[in-house]
Image: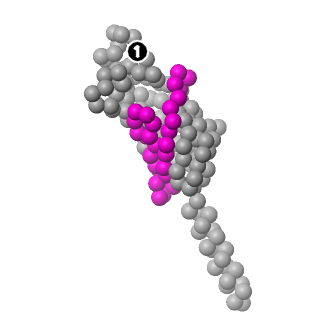
Amino acid sequence: MKTIATALVGLSALACAFAQSPDPMVGTWKGTSNSAVFGSGLHHPSLKTEENAVRFRHVEYTLTIDKQEGRNFVGSIGSDSHKEIVLGALAKDLKSGVMVNEHGMFNFTLPDTKTMDLCFTQVVPNSPSIPKVASCFEMEKR
């Protein structure tokens, strides 16, 4: 009887350990942005006449996560015109987190293992060559 109880305690501890492990983020994620943009930049080029006006843009992005260690990961994100390094971290709940790239910050949630809801903000003070961007979209793991 003592052996069975010990085995059950061991299995319970093992199940808890697996429950606390993050799902693999490594892979390719794709989605189309819903962005409000002021200014012009690599992912959001504009005509000279549009640079001082707010525009609404929809750009297809690819997030490629190359490496993950525990709750941290690294990869790249970009559109056809430009890719940037992205660094990320999952929160303790393993369902939300943050990412940063060259010019901005992403907040994200993972409703399931194949879907990422993310929002991006880009505001670089005193830098007229970098647009201001507010964007939210869904990415799917491929």
> Label 1 amino acid?
Ser
Q: Position of residue 29 (x, y in %)?
A: 58, 37
- Which residue shows up at 30% across the image and 16% down it? 52
Residue 118 visible somewhere in the drawing: yes
**What kind of element bears circle 1?**
loop
Q: Is residue 98 magenta?
A: yes
Location of the N terminus by quadrant is: bottom right
Q: Position of residue 88 (x, y in %)?
A: 49, 45
Q: Position of residue 100 (x, y in %)?
A: 44, 40
Q: Is residue 123 above or below residue 20?
A: above
Q: Is residue 102 magenta?
A: yes
In the rendered view, does 55 fall on the left or right side of 29? Answer: left
**Span shown in magenta:** 79-106
Residue wearing tag 1:
46
Query: Badge 1: few (under 14), some or many (20 or more) residues near its Cα, within 10 Å?
Result: some
- Which residue shows up at 59% across the image and 63% down it? 19
Q: How many marks?
A: 1
- Which residue shows up at 52% across the image and 51% down it? 72
Q: Position of residue 128 (x, y in %)?
A: 31, 22
